[in-house]
Image (cartoon, rainbow, N blue to C red):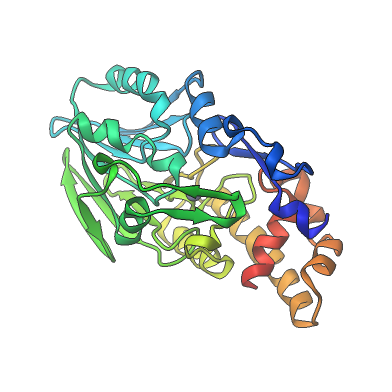
Amino acid sequence: MSHESFSRRHFLVSTGILTVATCFRPRSFLAESENIVLTARKRAETAAITVQNLRGNVNALLGSGGNIGVLCGKDGKLIIDSGYSTSRGKITGALAGLSPEPIKHLVNTHWHFDHTDGNEWMHSDGAIILAHENTKKHLSTTTRVEAWDFTFPPAPAGSIPAEVIDKEKTLSINNTKVVLACYGPSHTDGDLSAYFVEPDVLHCGDTWWNGHYPFIDYSTGGNIKGMIKAAEWNLAKASEKTIVIPGHGKIGGKSELTEYRNMLVTIHDKVAALKKEGKTLQETIAAKVTAAYDSKWATSFVTGDVFTKLVYAGA
Ligand SMILES: [Zn+2]
């Protein structure tokens, strides 16, 4: 794959995971309606939302961008990530089906639009938004993601987190402690986890993609070494009983987290060895170090070649 084809990737967006089709047309051929944000929002209008009760009053909503965590109870709902704005009707319906209380708190695991696009409507419904300070920074300003060839304008005022976290914060809501802990630079520079202590449920945001190569956003401070560190942290946090919510993919647990960490480490080490030998990016891609992993982990959004490039950049 030529270097140019990377910069001309044309993104399509499916309900859960962004999907990319390699596109060799010059950018000028791409209609406005084909850009990543508009396509994602458009698809989310019709995307089905699946509700999964995890344990106690903790639930997950799957189907609109990143996986959404929901803690129900008399203090009002606490939501982790807000999905796409166009899913509002379906998400509202799914939430009403869980319990009658309104949304009181919304936590963003990071700034990416498939996790924050619904911030504005959730805020207008009464949610206080909490996030890492860098998530607030990226939502407040014009932010470009080079790998997506897309520049995001500042988000509407109602979308901006009111409360920022730089290390850790524990909330006590609905008789449940919720520990929000920052990872440090990993998928972006503003990732945090949400751990529901009593029900023993961990939401990892996009530091974990269950069964898929992850996207790593170098444009806003992500890197492969940080992704591995975050995977180690998630593993240390999870016991055999912990239910773990990935940013993308199915709900899982420690064994799937372990498999994911091992995949990251193995591919990183192979790519790092080639880079150290002086191999160029193209030579490293040509070496097909991900070949044994592609059938399980590759998606049309992050193929083996794309993942090799993401690893090489930080190896
Ligand atoms: Zn993300």
- Total numbered badges shown on the rendered structure: 0
> Is residue 282 shown above or below 60?
below
Which one is in front, 305 or 173? 305
Quarter-wise, where is residue 311 in the image? bottom right
Residue located at (56% from left, 38% from top): 36
x, y (%) of residue 43? 54, 25
Which one is in front, 180 or 82? 82
x, y (%) of residue 172? 16, 47
x, y (%) of residue 86? 42, 25
Q: Is residue 57 visible?
A: no
Instruction: Work out which quarter of the rendered image holds the N terminus and state it.
Output: bottom right
Classify residue 35 as left or right of residue 99. Answer: right
Q: Residue furthest left?
A: 75
Residue located at (67% from left, 36% from top): 30
Quarter-wise, where is residue 157 in the image? top left
Q: Can residue 266 be seen in this view?
A: yes
x, y (%) of residue 108? 34, 47
Classify residue 9 as left or right of residue 231. Answer: right
Classify residue 213 as left or right of residue 165. Answer: right
Quarter-wise, where is residue 116 in the image? top left
Residue located at (42% from left, 42% from top): 115
Q: Which residue lies furthest to the front in this view?
A: 28
Which one is in front, 96 or 138? 138
Residue located at (58% from left, 37% from top): 35
Instruction: Work out which quarter of the rendered image holds the C terminus and state it.
Output: bottom right
